[in-house]
Image: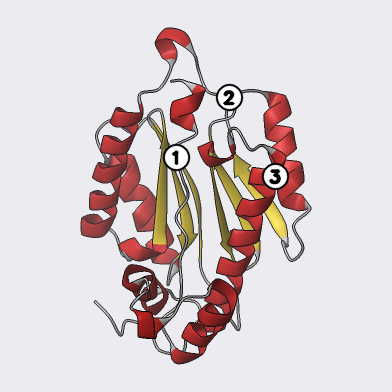
Amino acid sequence: MSREIRGTRAARAGLPLTSIAAALLLVIFGVSPALGFLPYRMMLEAARSPEKPLAFVHDKVLRLDLRKALVAADPDDAFSVSPYVYGGHAYLVGWVASDAERERVEAAARAVPGIRSLTSYLPIEPTGAAAPNETDELALKTKIEEAITLDSDAHRANVSVDVLGTHAVLVGVVASGAAVQTAGEAARRTPGVSGVTSFLSVPEPGNEKLLQGLLP
């Protein structure tokens, strides 16, 4: 896979649902509900998240800062690495071209103010005949997402799936330890998956919602 193709993989960002979170969005991102620019899919992610809205917003702000840091550190290939932040803990997932690139992006992430810890899955991308096929990766990702939706206790909106070759990486915050386990099992049972790395967790004490399951 060419470096140009790797550079097209952009990370998703999430935004909150409640009125407090919406106000913060207006200040932080300049998103105006009156103008019809509210990202409703992202609002639903916040509603379905087991984290409190303010914790959710804080993570999204940190994720934006993390993305900016990665672009500044490695502008040519920053979008081949997906950044995530949950509970202030950062995760980096994606292909890198070398050990030096891995060290560079990890150093940039650790320098972001507010990041409490960093965990990464950044293997060196194979080349030649062993190079991964992005179309195949996306197809396998879709199958894994469907499996998690149908065969686990985790809500799909709370689990981000990355596929590198045939290896799946799960990142997110889910409502329970059972959801962590069943999501991982669903991914491992998916045909074509050679291995699974799970960075799933549950909300930290004080950050969990008092009422969950308000949306299907």
How far separated are the C-alphas under marks 1 and 3? 17 Å
Screen quadrant of the C terminus:
bottom left
Q: Position of residue 134 (x, y in %)?
A: 35, 29
Mark 2 in CB contact with mark 1 (< 8 angstroms): no
Q: Position of residue 155 (x, y in %)?
A: 32, 66
Residue 124, disc: 2
How far separated are the C-alphas under marks 3 and 2? 20 Å
Q: Is residue 85 visible?
A: yes
Q: Label 1, on which residue?
A: 9
Residue extending furthest toward the left: 150
**Closer to the N terminus: mark 1 or mark 3?**
1
Asked which secondary structure carries label 2, the reply is loop
Residue 72, disc: 3
Does residue 10 appear left or right of residue 108 in this picture?
left
Does residue 22 appear left or right of residue 134 in this picture?
right
- The vertical placement of 73 against 23, above or below, is above
Q: Nearer the viewer, residue 12 or 192?
A: 12
| Mark toward the viewer: 1 or 3 | 3
| Mark toward the viewer: 2 or 1 | 1
What's the residue at 42%, 54% (across, down)? 160
Q: Quadrant of residue 70?
A: top right
Screen quadrant of the N terminus:
top left
What's the residue at 73%, 26% (across, down)? 100
Q: Nearer the viewer, residue 83 or 175?
A: 83
Asked which secondary structure carries label 3, the reply is helix
**Amino acid type, mark 1:** Arg
